[in-house]
Amino acid sequence: MIDSFITLKRCARRVRNRTTLLFFRLCESQREKFECPVCGYKGPFMDFAASTGVRKHAKCPKCGALERHRLQFLVVNDVLGKINTARLKMLHFAPEPFFRKFFSKRFDHYERADLRMKGVDHHVDLQQLPFDDATYDFVFASHVLEHIPDDEKAICEICRILKPNGIAILPIPIIVEKTVEYPQPNRYGHHHVRAPGTDYFQKYERHFSRVERFSSDSLPGKYQLFIYEDRSRWTTKKCPLRPSTQGEKHIDIVPVCYV
Ligand SMILES: [Zn+2]
């Protein structure tokens, strides 16, 4: 009885999603069209209302992937395409649902970790990991380090638990030119403790032998990997330490760090 109820709910959700997608495509047929590398959808993307403002062409209406997810997906595919992951061990921090399936299929041994998230394998603090040195081959932590007060310690810990030749992919939101540290977590800005800038990756370079950066403008435009956001309105009452930036189109970067 419960099983058939769950199946019915799933079917109803699928029908609703398809109807919404069809309606969106009809209403927005005049908008610029893109392609989602995650689900293969072709058509206009949705605007996304974030706490800091509306981002144009941000969200895939079929799978929900945002700009950063699409860029990360392309980079991860490229990196993993060059190595044999069948016998490797991976640790995924703050695991995103669609990446969970993607990674668990590729890695022989896949574990998830987070400070508080339900359903993960390890509840851990990145600043003090309970794992032995050289435990994992691959670590993925997207948009995590901007929440961690002692991020130097966290980067050091990630490096410590990686095996020789290990790889860490550690994207953070690039919000400003030069990183701004907040005196306390911003409760209006996802509890971030800093606004990372393009200089942030220098921290990785102190711990890893090589850091390769993949930028929005280094991959095909059809995937729409830029952040369209009016940052000239900053600072705001809710984000008093974010300096304003000119221009509406901003790049995102995915750093690939090699031990
Ligand atoms: Zn998609």
Image: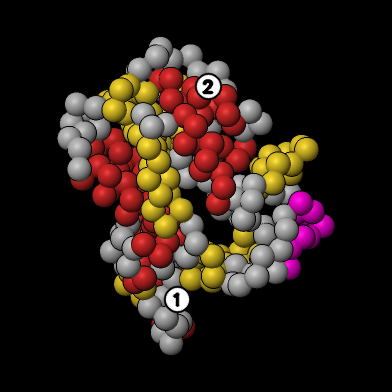
* Along the viewing direction, whichever of 21 and 211 lies nearer the viewer: 211
Cβ(mark 2) to ligand 1 < 8 Å? Answer: no
In the picture of the structure, the residue carrying the numbered disc 1 is: 24
Magenta stretch: includes residue 54:
no
Q: Are marks 1 and 2 in contact (CB under 8 Å)?
A: no
Relative to 163, residue 143 above or below: below
Q: Position of residue 67 (x, y in %)?
A: 46, 60
Front tag of 1 and 2? 2
Residue type marked 2: Val
Secondary structure type for disc 2: loop
Q: CA distance from mark 1 to mark 2?
A: 41 Å
Query: Mark 2 sits on what residue?
Result: 124
113 up-or-down from 195: above or below? above
Q: Is residue 118 visible?
A: no
In percent of width and height, residue 236 lies at 78, 60
Q: Could you tell me what secondary structure mostly forms the magenta stretch?
A: loop
Tag count:
2
Q: Element type at marker 1?
A: helix
Judging from the image, the colouring scheme is secondary structure
The x, y position of residue 115, in whole percent, is 56, 27
The answer to which image quadrant residue 43 occupies is bottom left
- The span shown in magenta is 233-241
The image quadrant where one finds the C terminus is top left
Q: Residue at x 39, y 53 (%)?
A: 214
Labels 1 and 2: the sequence-earlier one: 1
Who is closer to the viewer here, 126 or 21? 126
Q: Quick one: 91 or 153, which is closer to the camera? A: 153
Left/right placement of residue 104 relative to residue 225 reads left
Q: Residue at x 23, y 37 (%)?
A: 106
Q: Is residue 107 visible?
A: yes
